[in-house]
Image (tube, rainbow, N blue to C red):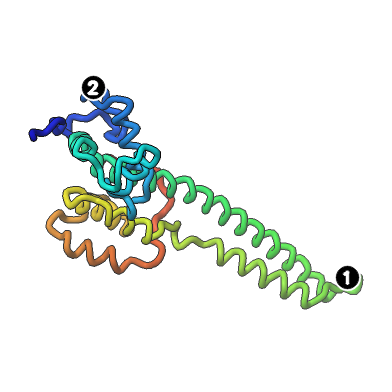
Amino acid sequence: MGRLFQIRDINAFNEPIWSQQKDYGETNEYYAMFLSFCNVSPSHRSLNNTWREWTKDAGYGQHPSTTYKQIASAFHWIERAAARDVQELRERYSIWSERDWDWREGDYKTGETLRKQAERAIEHLNSDDFKPDIQTIISMLQTASSLQKGSIPNIGALSSTQVQDILAALPDSKRKRVLRIVMAEYKEEGEASIPDDQSDIIDAEVKSLPTSVGRRKSSRKSVGQE
């Protein structure tokens, strides 16, 4: 039996590549299938799992039909879903990074206020009119120090578990590209500074990353396309 669906050229797809490709024959039904594939977490995403979810009320069996598999192949579901994953991860990180910095700034300012109050109280230690409590002053200074030290970022937090989850779901052709992006973010260097011929080294470095992958607050351009 011949292939029913011709494989499209993913490089010609409209941006972003995970959007519906009507110009290339992706109907509403095909796109709905693709979105159901995307909506499964990367570590559990497979045609078998998404097929069962897509047909759970129709009783079509546990294994995807030939047509379903050919649609997935023709419209590059794996590559497009991976690109979408990376973009969503970037967007989530950007949002929480901003919230993280706002929270840290608030703690730092609160600590600064407490410190100033404690310093004003210290100035009155030898006053006959007002005798501040020493333990209260110490407690204020300790709290101020704790708040201000805790507000210093590590910097930002990107779960390495999230990164590894997405990497595991990537096709080989895309994995090296994303590894370079991750390491460039971690090292705070431009992506071009990570050589193409060091994929094994990069892979090893990613596996050795700490629980949180630090990144300074920035307005870098999102990638998400590869």
Please provide percent x and percent y for residue 133: 82, 75
Q: Nearer the viewer, residue 146 or 94?
A: 94
Mark 1 or 2: in front is 2
Residue drawn 32% across the image and 28% down it: 29
Please provide percent x and percent y for residue 168: 27, 57
The residue most toward the left is 2
Residue drawn 33% across the image and 66% down it: 209
In the picture shown, does residue 108 fall above or below 73? below
Q: Which badge, 1 or 2, is on the more N-terminal residue?
A: 2
Marks 1/2 in contact by CB < 8 Å: the verdict is no
Give the quarter of the image for residue 104: bottom right
| Whether residue 55 is visible | yes
| Whether residue 220 is visible | no
Mark 2 Cα shell of 10 Å, populated few (<14), some (14-19), many (≥20): few
Please provide percent x and percent y for residue 2: 8, 33
**Label 2 secondary element:** helix
Label 1, label 2: how far apart the Cα atoms are: 80 Å
Q: Quadrant of the C terminus?
A: top left
Left or right placement of residue 127 versus residue 165 in this view: right
In the picture shown, does residue 121 fall above or below 215? below
Left or right placement of residue 225 versus residue 12 in this view: right
Q: Nearer the viewer, residue 94 or 218?
A: 94
Q: Nearer the viewer, residue 34 or 170?
A: 34
Q: Give the amino acid at mark 1.
A: Phe
Please provide percent x and percent y for residue 49: 32, 48
- Residue under label 2: 23
- Residue under label 1: 130
